[in-house]
Image (tube, grey):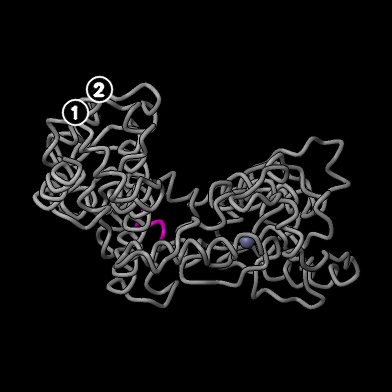
Amino acid sequence: MRPQHRLVNNVGYTKIYPMSSTADDTFCHYCGRKASILNGLSWDHVPALNVKVPKEFIAGIRKTLIRACVECNNMASDIAHIDYAERHLWLKTKYLQKYKKLILSEGGGSDPEKFSGFLKAYVSNQKKLYVEILGAIGFGIQSIDQIESEILNLRNSSRKLVGTVLIDYLYGTPEDDQEELEEVSITLRSEVSRDEEPYEYMDEYDFILFLSAEMEAGNIIKNQVDYLEWKDHHESRFTLLDLPLEPESHYETPWSVLAKLAQQNFGWDQESNRSGEYEELISLLAELMSEGYPVISLEDYLEIKRTPPAKFKPLIREVMREDPENYYGVSWDELSEHVIKKSHENFISVDLDAFLNILNSKKHGLSSVNCGMSYCEWVSNHRNTFKYLKLPVCPEFAYELTWAKINELTDKLALDNG
Ligand SMILES: [Zn+2]
């Protein structure tokens, strides 16, 4: 069963509600967010249960329970904060770090209407998340000076200081309600002293996350038999995670539903991570293209992965998968279309007239260029000229013309110039 010291440690924790005048446990008192399917609420121990407080400080320390969302709870979990205020401010810095990229890009910078399918859903989710995270950071903060972070001095994609942007999201102040505390403390103590269930078991949301994490690790737990078998092999984790012995009756939810939720959550997680990665991959490939590294075929892709240009080496290692079609569930044609679209969005090239004139001039070794393949070959051999002349990554896409038509126009121009 459970180790004795945790049972003792858990006693004497007092529920406090720093961000509400009543005992409101419907939102996270660190970030202000309400419970959602993916971010539930639970009680956060401050100081954390396993933190050893030096003897000389014990007298001055209040053991508190704070209503916290899973994300805040997980981020702060075992960090040795002495009280709510310290943890509250610490979390603000952490959120800035965790979401630095999202904040600097103001939620990705892309217009969701430019995408379709899951990319569109991903981009609009990023925008929503951006606003949510700024709200979470501003919650319970009166002045930006309270937050310590270099990120406040950085400029976002609209050249605004992050600190300035955050000012609009500051909301509410923690209050000090000592008197009310004592009362709550007494109720909690009497709750705790009851013989049965002295524990707060992991809440249902965390339990679902636990099941999907195990699923990811290859342990499929879909009924009580699987569960008990897992428990036999992971006795210490079972205790440490405060897992209930009988989830079905504890959560009043049948195993079939628990298992299904876990599976959905697992799938969701995977998809959202992958669509983020996919976005990164598309941006990277688009940038490579505009630098004169054509990635038109899967062979080009694998070649660049094998011999990456120095400047892109770390990114390529991180983002380019061995088998992108399988990994992201897209065909090479789709992927390639996304990349070409992206590079034309991000980089401006010459207009059709100028392009035809350059082709017609036959300078820079362009005389042999008359199709997509010879164009790509020329680009990879003339990177600087390509960039200098601002030529398009894919002329067919840029001018909506086939190479046959481009050749025809170039020939005509040659005749005219005659
Ligand atoms: Zn929170």
360 displayed left or right of 161: left
- The boundaries of the magenta stretch are 209-213
Is residue 18 or residue 416 the one in the foreground?
Answer: 416
In the foreground, 160 or 250: 160
Give coordinates of residue 158: x percent, y percent. 62, 53
Q: Horizontal and vertical percent for residue 13? A: 73, 59
The image shows residue 350 at horizontal and vertical percentages of 35, 46
Image quadrant holding the C terminus, namely top left
The location of residue 415, given as percent across then percent down, is: 13, 44
Ligand 1 is within 8 Å of the C-beta of the residue at disc 2: no
Residue 53: tell me if it is visible. Answer: yes
Residue 44 falls left or right of residue 167: left
Q: Do residues under tags 2 and 1 come within 8 Å of each other at their CB atoms?
A: yes
Considering the whole magenta stretch, tell me its main secondary structure: helix
Q: Residue at x 77, y 48 (%)?
A: 147
Counting other residues with Cα less than 10 Å from the Cα at mark 1, is it few (<14), some (14-19), or many (20 or more)? few
Residue at left offset 17%, top offset 46%: 416
Residue of label 1: 303
On whether residue 300 falls in the magenta region, the answer is: no
Image region (quadrant) for ligand 1: bottom right
